[in-house]
Image: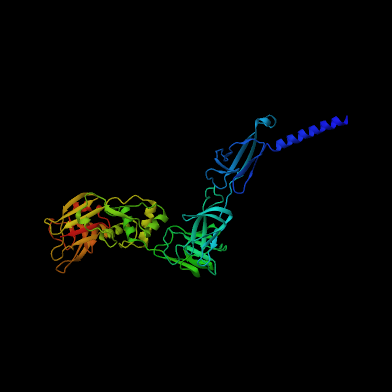
Amino acid sequence: MRGPALVAFGLVAVVALALTAVLELSGVTLVRDESALARADVQPLAGTLLPARASDPEGRAIALADSDGALTPAKPIAPGTKVTIVVTARRPGWNAWLLGKSATRRLTVMAPLATVTSRWVTRPAGGPVPVTFSEPVARVAYARHSARGTGTSFKLPEQAKAGTVKVAVAARPWEKLGDPATVHYFPPAKRPVALVSPAPGGRLDPGDQVRLVFSQPPSGTLPRASLAGHWRRPDDHTLVFTASGAGPTLGTHVKITLPHTAALADTSGRAIKTGRELTWTVPPASPKRLIQLLAEEGYLPVQFDGRTVEHTVRAQSAAAAHPPDGDFGWRYAHTPPELKRQFTPETGNVIVRGAIMMFQDEHHLTVDGLPGPDLWKALLGDAVDDKPAHRGYSYVYVHREQRPQQLTLWHSGKTILTSPGNTGVPAAPTELGTFPVFEHLAETTMSGTNPDGSHYSDPGIKWVSYFNGGDALHAFDRASFGTPQSVGCVELPLASAKKIWPYTPIGTLVTIES
């Protein structure tokens, strides 16, 4: 009996071994790969390997290329993308009844993510900029250039002594370039280097921030500034100073003192010198911007057509130093030629001086016609507040040699009044020219010297607008008007003077022509 039992046991053992061999040789493997996303292998008895499938975390399909089992994306994918791969082998019919029609394997992998590890580097004297990576990379892109097969480091052939360059890398040939990293590079020096913007010793505009980028992280002690403001630290190597309010005062100097001596240079590494103090010059206010603001705020018969400046303190202060480009055009269609031919966009122009005087008077400033600090402060304040423009523009002109002599009052494109008037007698003629009104009185006593040397003092003179020394527009009781009868003033009938007076505040121009 022992013989048949042994034979049966042997047969069972052989069958078991055969089944084990079939099982081991009828599967498919799917494993990570150093150069590809993954590697798929089919066993000799597993049958046919179907095309692999892949998808991203959102379920979007990713086409794969298969090179002897090495699976890579058919189109470049972003570094760090998580990819789920599924491979299936279809078994032949002779063993499908035993093991199933197919064998499937699933694997989730992540595309490698290489990063730039040297973000703050000192370049060797005259040499390229050394950059290192977290792992070997297949491609590097920088400043519109690219290179392949660069390993774990690369030398950028930058021309400037210092600066920044964007560097993007891909760890595998089948990846897209990753997000670019900013590499800051510095010239060699015995002390830590600070790259300064704007350039030390140059110009600092009111809207500028001061940026200091250090080759080594600065100490916790902040630099001292000569004006109010605050510091912030965007990263371990950078300090940014922002002045308070409108920024530095126009036409002044700004100084920043570092807590420790450093090698100081501009952002390109030029003009490097050792020290602690940084200085800049703030440009003065521009006469061009002064005229633009007076036009925008309605104090001139012209309007400014140019780029709009934001109604913020910093933007308006910056524009005061660097005016926007644009042109001046006449605000009103029917502007007297006597006025038109006198305008030029210069602060010495009488039309601009009159506008300054009117603005000063309305803002309770000293009326001197000069663009001083108080005027600029008020002008910029109105621009920031976006106050409504001054309403209307008046102009008075008289032709001295005309008979009868007449005064014309023009306002905002319309002739308001034409009236006969008396200018000065030949021995005391009314001076030719254009003059801004500097004193505006409802009633006063007028006194002076007659051509014969005698003195006069006339109380109760109404509706008086002085425009040139003792010459004024005013009411006067005369038997007739239209001929030279005064000692320099422009005398008007009471009704005319009363109507004209509200239109001739301080700064209004009066032209006396031949």
Figure quadrant of residue 362? bottom left
Residue 87 x/y as whole percent: 61, 38
Q: In this view, does 415 lie above or below 127?
A: above
The foreground one among 397 and 328 is 328
Residue 197 placement, left or right of 33? left
The foreground one among 294 and 232 is 232
Residue 147 placement, left or right of 207? right
- Residue 297, visible in the rendered structure: no
Residue 288 x/y as whole percent: 32, 59
Q: In which quarter of the image is the C terminus?
A: bottom left
The residue sitting at 19% across, 52% down in the picture is 496
Figure quadrant of residue 360? bottom left
Work out which residue is located at the far right of the displayed protein and give it: 1
Figure quadrant of residue 431? bottom left
Residue 19 placement, left or right of 401? right
Residue 434 x/y as whole percent: 22, 60
The foreground one among 116 and 32 is 32
| Number of numbered callouts drawn | 0
Work out which residue is located at the far left of the displayed protein and give it: 403
The residue sitting at 32% across, 63% down in the picture is 370
The foreground one among 174 and 176 is 174
- Residue 450, visible in the rendered structure: yes
Residue 101 x/y as whole percent: 65, 31
